Amino acid sequence: MTTVSDHNRIQRWLLPAILALGLLLIQRPAPCVAQTPGDPVSFVNDVVPVLTKAGCNAGVCHAKAGGGQNGFQLSLLGFEPLEDYQHLVREGRGRRLFPLDPPRSLLLAKAAGDVPHGGGVRIEKDSKNYNTLLRWIQAGSPYRPAADPDLVAIAIEPATGTLLPGESLNLRSIATFSDGSTRDVTKTSLFESNDSAMATVTESGQVTALDLPGKVSVMVRYQDRVAVYNASIPLGQPVTPPPPNNFIDELVFANLKQLGIPPSQVCDDATFLRRVSLDIAGRVPTEVEARAFAADDAADKRATAIDRLLRSPDYADYFANKWTALLKNRRDDASDITSNFAFHAWVRDNLLAGTAYDQLVRQLLAATGTVIANPPVAWYKRVKEPKQQIEDVAQLFLGVRLQCAQCHHHPFERWSQEDYYSLAAFFSRIGRKPTDTAGEDLIFHQRGMAQAVNMKNGQPVPPAALGDSVGEIPPDEDPRLRLADWMANPDNPFFAKSLVNRYWKHFFRRGLIEPEDDIRDTNPPTNPELLGALERHFVDSGFDLRALIRAITNSKAYQLSAIPNEHNLVDSQNYSRFYPKRLQAEVMLDAIDQVTGAQTSFANLPIGTRAVALPDNSYNKASPFLRVFGRPEATSVCECERVQSGSLAQSLHLMNAGDIKSKLAAGGGRINRLIGEKTSAAEKINELYLAAFARAPSESELATALQYINEPRTGADGKPLDETRTLRENLQDLTWALLNTKEFLFNH
């Protein structure tokens, strides 16, 4: 007969023994209970995909990248299975698994909702995925069976197709392994539509097309591999496009024919001149240019106007403004002035001289010396850390966003931490020495073997360009030159593609790949044939930026009207019409100055300096207009930093701000000049319309304007104003009204 004290002694001895036995069973790699009939279960090839499908390793749940809920951390989307195995099986004394009674394992109980779980029910008890986890625990929770093959690739079936609006299709995800075997992994694959307004996809892979016509893609992920299903959703209307001007038209119109989306008509001359002047030179045409273009009967006058704009200093000013913002030419204190002005002038002068794009990038990447002797060195003043250098270079010049890969495998792409640090190795030998100029450094190449250190495993990583070998780099050779050589190689899959896509978006408002700096297999272009043709044209031209712009702006696709027809109103990705875009802050300020005849003065710059020619961001502080309308502060290589959307503050500024009123009333402005000229009211109105819209007013517009111009005014005392003052105030009101129209505020 046992006593109470005997029971206590047994509990003190037996319970720790049972716990130790349970922990031993969990830690043993071999199964400790009878195997469940069927194939062996692999943590890598079976369990991790189930956890990923259930969202357990997503950023908002237990992914380490998101902090991991309740201390349970897994690698993002299962890209580090060995680490996940350690966390799941051995962490917390094995509390998440209960091999003596597998269904009571915390992993299963929480996922199935048997115990409270913040993420709710993630796996149904009667599902195949639940059974996979159960069989794995019953088998002793092995990491991998002895003959477990590695995943080589996945494929989606079908890979392409056409879906009519409302039609559905079931996709299949097929995995190929290193032993040559294949497996249908649809139930454990993740599916995601790149445009849910065009097509939806269920967890099981059923794609349903909606009513918007165009191209849509579905990304499929299994473990660390991705595949893409591309579908066309046709509108099905007959298409008769205008005669093509070049290869761009042939490919744009071929795509529209396939989709059955009729294009709009070609725009009129006035619209074209204003559009191309804004897009190439960053300014509205003068009334002299507008009159001369309207009077020109030459068949090639549009091509002539394009060439004239490309040769002008205005082109260099406008695109230097674009590139210096992306290259972070930012002034944080007074010591930046020299480098800011020198760098801006270097970019502008190279654009004006027509320097090839690959050479311009080479000068930037491999810059050494001082800012005074070699202005592109200024980039290294602003972007100092190697990781920031490679992230900026990859995003800006290759269209690849590598930021995620610093800590974990890129969730939407094939880039790993090894790829990240091997690219950083190109910048590992940059040396700095202070100079006599405050805030300036001498940049030089330090002799030695180029390598970076993978922060995850502490191992050195030699230079490699996104999976491509650049060969062994001698200690006395600057690794950045090898990177520039790799970029300029005609077979480089990123360099030319990134630039032509960026410039296409500049002219069409939407890139063939969107966002323009996110080029990856899982984000395919809407017209891959066109993107490939633009890329080849750019390479064959010797990376000539002007030649690319010339090809784009001479195309009928660029010259289509912004006015939709009855069929293409919903099209937002296939360029069946021109997509209007709001004028940039600097361009709008210059346009207001040009229409009113006023001048905005900027500190320490010559009178008449245009806003698009400002060398850095410091002028934003002194200009309420530039701040309100979203001129970027040059803190990012993403063009998304520039605000292009409208706001209430912008509307109020245009209607009521003191600087707008002062420009309208400027003593040496257009309105005072028009009052002094002995021209008719109709001629004065015509000039204002030409200055604002590059066109003459219509009959109804002219009649309305004349009626308003000739309307008498009374003063505060009720007495009629004199004729000159009345005309001045009426012309100011008319000009103010023109400046507030959408036709003025948008490039259309």
Image: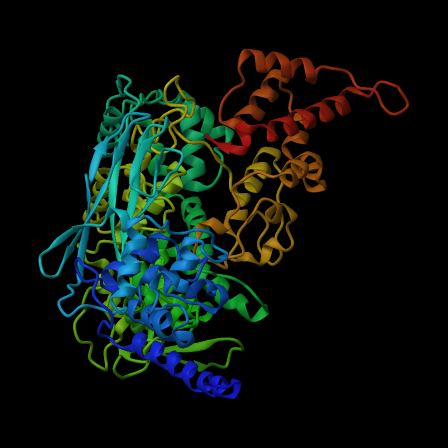
Q: Is residue 536 visible?
A: yes
From what the image shows, is residue 569 above or below residue 393?
Answer: above
Residue at (37, 56) in percent of width and height:
396
Relative image position of residue 672 (x, y in whole percent): 68, 31
Percent x, y of residue 692: 55, 29
On the picture, is 266 further left or further right than 11? left
In the image, is residue 682 above or below residue 386?
Answer: above
Q: Position of residue 159 (x, y in %)?
A: 20, 40
Place of residue 536 in the rendered image (x, y in percent of width and height, measured from the top left): 20, 45
Compared with 436, 54 (above or below) is above
User: Left or right of 612: which side holds 554?
Assistant: left
In the displayed image of the protein, which residue is found farthest to the left? 180
Q: Residue at x 48, y 29 (%)?
A: 288
Residue 704 appears in which quarter of the rendering? top right
User: Which quadrant of the structure image shows residue 34?
Assistant: bottom left
Q: Where is residue 178, by image quadrant? A: bottom left
Of the 4 image quadrants, the one containing the C terminus is top left
Do we see residue 392 in this rendering? Answer: no
Q: Nearer the viewer, residue 383 or 359?
A: 383
Nearer to the camera, 286 or 660 = 660
Quadrant housing the N terminus = bottom left
Horizontal arrangement in the rendering, residue 9 relative to residue 184 (left or right)? right
Q: Nearer the viewer, residue 606 or 100?
A: 100
Please identify the residue farthest to the front as the structure is shown: 1
At horizontal 55% and vertical 28% (from top left) the residue drawn is 742
Residue found at x 35% / y 47%: 502
Q: Relative to the observer, which residue lies in front, 360 or 488?
A: 488
Tell whether 282 sits left or right of 202. Answer: right
Where 81 falls versus 239 (above or below)? below
